[in-house]
Amino acid sequence: MSIQDIAYRPAGELRAMQEEKLQALLSFLNQYSPFYRRVFKNIDIQMVRKLEDLAAIPVTTKEDLQKFNWDFLCVDKNRIAEYTSTSGTLGDPVTIALTENDLDRLAYNEFMSFSTAGGSPEDIYQLMLTLDRQFMAGIAYYSGARKMGAGVIRLGPGAPSLQWETIQRLQPTTIVAVPSFICKLIDYAQEKGIDFNQSSVKKAICIGEGIRNPDFSFNVLGKKIKESWNIHLFSTYASTEMQTAFTECREGKGGHLRPELLIVELLDDLDQPVPPGTPGEVTITTLAVEGMPLLRYKTGDICTFDDRPCACGRHSLRLSPLLGRKKQMIKFKGTTLYPSVLFDLLNGMSEIRDYIVEVSTNKLGLDEVLLYLLPVALTEDTDHKVRAWLQARLRVTPFIKYVGHEELQRMQVSETNRKPIKFIDKRGDAL
């Protein structure tokens, strides 16, 4: 199946299309959304004609969505075809309800995302992620590959031995997986003498974790994969609430906006737009969503953007790798950190097999960081190297607790989480 990529149209056409869709959205929300009808009481939405006019409308927060979840529903419940939920990383999970048309939109989004990453009907996608537990991404990847006409292997997460047995038997061309799990696939293949560079896999769609630094160079995870496995890596950024994905093209210079599906603003702490290249909070307005459309919804994610044409020929805005999540920012001994910085440092240590970062509030009301580390071998030399590495790169040394494999597994696996826990935020416990 072939669909023309709208993102190749001139920037002026894309803007005009978004403004037309925005006016349709405002009318739809005013008619069907209990939440936004309240928001619009003191706003003349007829005056919101241009993208810049969005500033006249208050932002919607994650707390709004948690507190008034069902007030965002714009259709009768008998029209809901699929109930999905957020992961609850930054608070209580919320339900996102989709109609049949929303599911079609989701499939179109992922079809275009796979196409941006060079996908074609000749590909076979091995999905190394859950397709249950109300996980929107799982159904999106599956339906997007099917819309493309590609083959799909729904294998699910974990079990490197089964993943490799399936790769060797069914010959997929592309895997969809969390980058840290791809590293585990490499480790398993090396232990078992599998020549993975001669396998059928030529591409990986990387989900859930970053593989690039802010300058688009590969971070530690990306380097670990590329240094061993000669495959193309494509970074993605998405959330359940936006029902849309930003996916890299082969240029690897940011995730492309789907302009027909989403309006994106990057805002500062005063909810003012930031210029290109300046960090801001990703704030999204969904287009063509029926069940639970969102208007100026603040995701809590910090990125930069580039609105110049991409070398691939697309004119759609591009987002940088995720710099951090606003609520996860850590102030530790005078140093500002995001968990992703700690993840990158720990991923780069050959002495450490796995880890969890925990932040809490001490008796003085200050952030305190504790690292649970699973070492390759617990020796005095290992401990010295770990502390020296962290001190040299952070200028501060977090508290460290070495744990065994079983203890770390118990901490990482939760019935309510769809992927292993890497970050535990206990600061709310002190309130």
Image (cartoon, grey):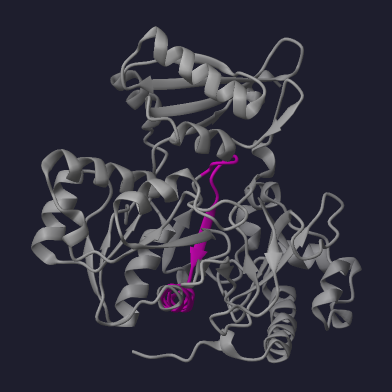
Residue 425, relative to residue 141: is it above or below? Answer: above
Residue at point 45%, 13% (across, down): 383
Residue 260 lies, in percent from the top left, at 60, 82
Of residues 360 and 297, which is closer to you in this image?
Answer: 360
For residue 66, side relative to residue 226 (left or right): right
Residue at point 59%, 66% (across, down): 292
Where's residue 207, x and y in %? 43, 55
Q: Which residues are magenta?
A: 88-112
Residue 175, quarter of picture: bottom left
Foreground pick, 59 / 77: 59
Foreground residue among 36 and 198: 198
Q: What residue is drawn where x is 57% and y is 51%?
A: 213
Answer with left or right where residue 116 lies relative to residue 265.
Answer: left
Asked if residue 106 is among those painted magenta in the image, a careful observer would answer yes
Q: Quadrant of the N terminus?
A: bottom left
Residue 340 seen in this snapshot: yes
Residue 295 visible to an observer of this rendering: no
Q: Quadrant location of the C terminus?
A: top right
With 406 as the anchor, is 395 left or right in this view?
right
Image side of residue 307 versus residue 272, left or right: left
